[in-house]
């Protein structure tokens, strides 16, 4: 019966739902990428672009920490000023579906095209798989900062405000470098060292990825303002 408690409860509820949506968007997108890559390779009679151990490593070590960190995302400014959502609004919104499946399919086939190109130029399969594994990880790092806020573009908020997320990305990057360059993990994951040009390609793909997702967000932000 205390109005201030009701307001605080509504605010906290919106924060929780928002953070759940951010986490879902990141984790489903990550799994969907692997599904597209592996499925397209099997249908095309090609070698697997990533091995089962590498997929497990990517899901548990590289991607999951960012998903967990997004659950601790601080509340967004003006969250209590938004109009109430329709109670029938699904947890998986149209914007999330577009980011995960629409935009996701494009970037996934971009990775698959890279896989085909690397095979065609004759790179050893172990190196090709290492590049794809590293690419999926780098992609997740960039993606996580875009998922921090699905209602604003990345230049409208501080992408480094969540120290848990920043720490998880730094941890993921260090673990990725260890997987690529440390012999014990190379033996475990069947990876090989990558050169500077390989990392440059992955950096370009990561930047392209974040441009595409921000363009998708911008479209829905503009659409919502015009409603």
Image: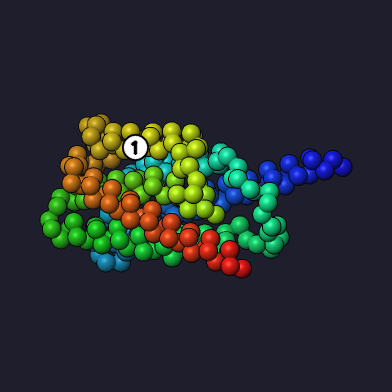
Residue 51 in view in this figure:
no
Front residue of this view, candidates 25 and 184: 25
Indicate the secondary structure of the residue bearing disc 1.
Answer: helix
Front residue of this view, candidates 74 and 158: 158
Q: In the rendering, at what x and y percent does residue 106 appear?
A: 36, 64
Residue 78 in view in this figure:
yes
Can you name the residue that lies furthest to the left here? Answer: 122
Q: Is residue 174 left or right of residue 103?
A: left
> Which residue is disc 1 drawn over?
173
x 18%, y 46%: residue: 197
Looking at the image, is 63 positioned above or below residue 167? below
The total of numbered circles placed on residues is: 1
| Image quadrant in which you'd find residue 43 | bottom left
Looking at the image, is 30 positioned above or below residue 171? below
Front residue of this view, candidates 101 and 38: 101
Looking at the image, is 177 positioned above or below residue 227? above
Q: In the rendering, at what x and y percent does residue 128 appear?
A: 21, 51
Q: In the rendering, at what x and y percent does residue 195 appear?
A: 17, 42
Q: Residues within 10 Å of mark 1 (few under 14, many from 20)?
A: some
Q: In the rendering, at what x and y percent does residue 227 appear?
A: 61, 68
The quadrant of the picture occupied by the N terminus is top right
Q: Is residue 181 left or right of residue 137?
A: left
Q: Colour scheme used in the picture?
A: rainbow
x 66%, y 54%: residue: 82
x 69%, y 45%: residue: 11
| Image quadrant in which you'd find residue 172 | top left
Q: Is residue 90 left or right of residue 137?
A: right
x 45%, y 49%: residue: 155
């Amino acid at each position: 019966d205390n109005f201030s408690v009701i307001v605080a409860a509504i605010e906290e509820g919106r924060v929780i739902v928002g953070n759940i949506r951010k986490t879902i968007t990141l984790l489903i997108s990550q799994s969907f990428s692997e599904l597209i890559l592996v499925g397209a390779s099997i249908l095309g009679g090609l070698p697997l672009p990533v091995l089962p151990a590498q997929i497990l490593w990517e899901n548990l070590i590289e991607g999951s920490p960012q998903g967990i960190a997004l659950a601790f995302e601080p509340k967004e400014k003006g969250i209590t000023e938004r109009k109430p959502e329709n109670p029938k609004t699904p947890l998986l919104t149209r914007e999330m579906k577009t980011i995960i499946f629409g935009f996701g399919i494009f970037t996934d086939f971009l990775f698959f095209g890279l896989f085909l190109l690397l095979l065609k130029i004759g790179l050893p399969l172990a190196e090709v798989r290492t590049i794809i594994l590293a690419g999926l990880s780098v992609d997740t790092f960039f993606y996580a900062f875009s998922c921090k806020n699905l209602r604003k573009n990345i230049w409208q908020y501080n992408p480094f405000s969540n120290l848990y997320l920043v720490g998880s990305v730094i941890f993921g990057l260090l673990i990725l470098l260890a997987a690529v360059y440390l012999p014990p993990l190379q033996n475990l994951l069947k990876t090989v060292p990558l050169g500077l040009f390989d990392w440059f390609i992955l950096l370009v793909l990561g930047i392209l990825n974040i441009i595409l997702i921000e363009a998708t967000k911008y479209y829905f932000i503009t659409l919502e303002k015009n409603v």
